Amino acid sequence: MFSSDSTVISDPARRYCRIKYILAIIETGYLIILLFLFAGLGLSSGLVKYLNGLFQNKPLILAAYILIAYFSYYLLVFPLNLYHSLLLERKFGLSNQKITSWLKDQLKTAIISYFIFLILAWAFYYILKHFLHSWWLVVSLFWVLFSLILAKLTPVLIIPLFFKYRKLSEGDLRHRIVRLAEKMGIKSLDVFEIDFSKKTLKGNAAFLGWGRTKRVILADTLKDKYSDEEIEVILAHEFAHYRLKHLIKLILVNSLATIISLYIIFLTNDKVLWLAGASSLWDISVLPVLLIYLVICAILLGPLLNYFSRRFEIEADNQALEATGLKEAFISTFEKLAVQNLADRNPHPLIKLIFFDHPSIDERIALARKYH
């Protein structure tokens, strides 16, 4: 997805971004605390014992355990989730979504998340059983494969659950996008418009999928407010990601982070299993401890992953400028997106280090101004 920041930040944008940062920190800390309590108070082991009395099949026990634990977690974070994803957006004029629509989206997200987590957990325990000393590496490889499958299926299976697709009508804009794609070596793609405006007033666009599922997705909130040249710049940036194989590179970088995280678990798990009252990773009640590991590793490795992501974004910006030559449109696009999305235009270096997987707009506009 295309995102932005800029130079002078307005008061609403400053307040909005500050609240988002604080909420992100609170939600992460809250998650870690809940996981510690779930494991340390014996709730996890108690739940497993209860389910063992109901079922004999371990995959079924795992499915029931995750369902109960996930539902309980969702109820505990519901107030934060409601404020973060709906009330805050409404307060700053970024959302017009109705509460009923939001609740439906939450249910869909919960179901999708449950099945994704269940697949990953099933795979983890299967691999743990068959690869006693190298499970950390095999699990990482499986997660890479699963990420690729998700990337392929997301445009055709997941996004249509939340937004209505329609093919972009024939006209100058569609022809411009197709010509640009061909110029940048991308063939056999289609262009769709989705009804973002029913839920959010933010602008966005993306080039998703691979193989037969690759497609351009234009939010109506962007298509109706930006010139054809500005939309061309945005999509040139997205096509550049595909051309430069940034999706594959990001998956590989993230897989390396996963390998590091799982290897740390492999080396040290015997020292923390007491937290869940377990003697082996094979015990389902250890799942909260594994999640604590992964969350903490994600926090520690996040700045490094953000750095690589920002480098890829700069590469895509360079390619977009080279492919289009639309320097002024590039600058005006970022200025408009910054206002429309209430972006943090000039983040503190520490904020940038922790939260930003895109460069600040100062860097991106400076890059455009150097282009000849």
Image (cartoon, rainbow, N blue to C red):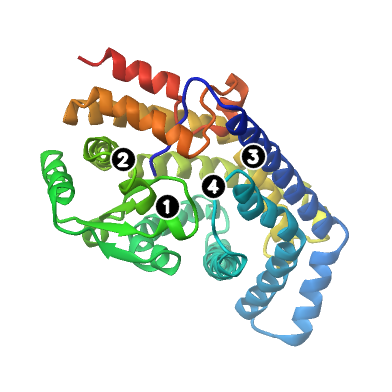
Instruction: State which quadrant residue 181 falls in.
Output: top left
Q: Position of residue 110 (x, y in %)?
A: 59, 67
Q: Tags 3 and 4 in contact by the CB under 8 Å rule?
A: no
Asked if the residue at tag 2 contacts the one at tag 1, i.e. Cβ–Cβ closer than 8 Å, the answer is no
Residue type of the residue flagged with mark 2: Tyr
Residue placed under numbered mark 3 in the picture? 20
Q: Earlier in the sequence, mark 1 or mark 3?
A: 3
Mark 4 lies on a secondary structure that is loop
Mark in front: 1 vs 2: 2
Please give left or right for residue 247 compared with residue 39 in the image: left
Q: Nearer the viewer, mark 3 or mark 2?
A: 2
Please name which of the two marks, 3 or 4, marks the residue nearer to the observer. 4
- Circle 2 residue: 226
Residue 157 numbered mark, or none:
none
Q: Residues within 10 Å of mark 1 (few under 14, many from 20)?
A: some
**Which quadrant, please, contains the N terminus?**
top left
* Closer to us: 1 or 140: 1
Task: Point out residue 314 in the picture as x, y percentages from the top left corner.
Answer: 35, 26
Q: Residue at x 66, y 42 (%)?
A: 24
Residue at the disc numbered 1: 144
Label 3 or label 4, whichever comes before in sequence order: 3
Residue highlighted by disc 4: 94
Is residue 118 something that shows in the picture?
A: yes
Q: Quadrant of the C terminus?
A: top left
Do labels 1 and 4 touch, CB within 8 Å? no
Mark found first going from the N terminus, 4 or 2:
4
197 or 105, nearer to the observer: 197
Residue sitting at x 49%, y 50%: 137
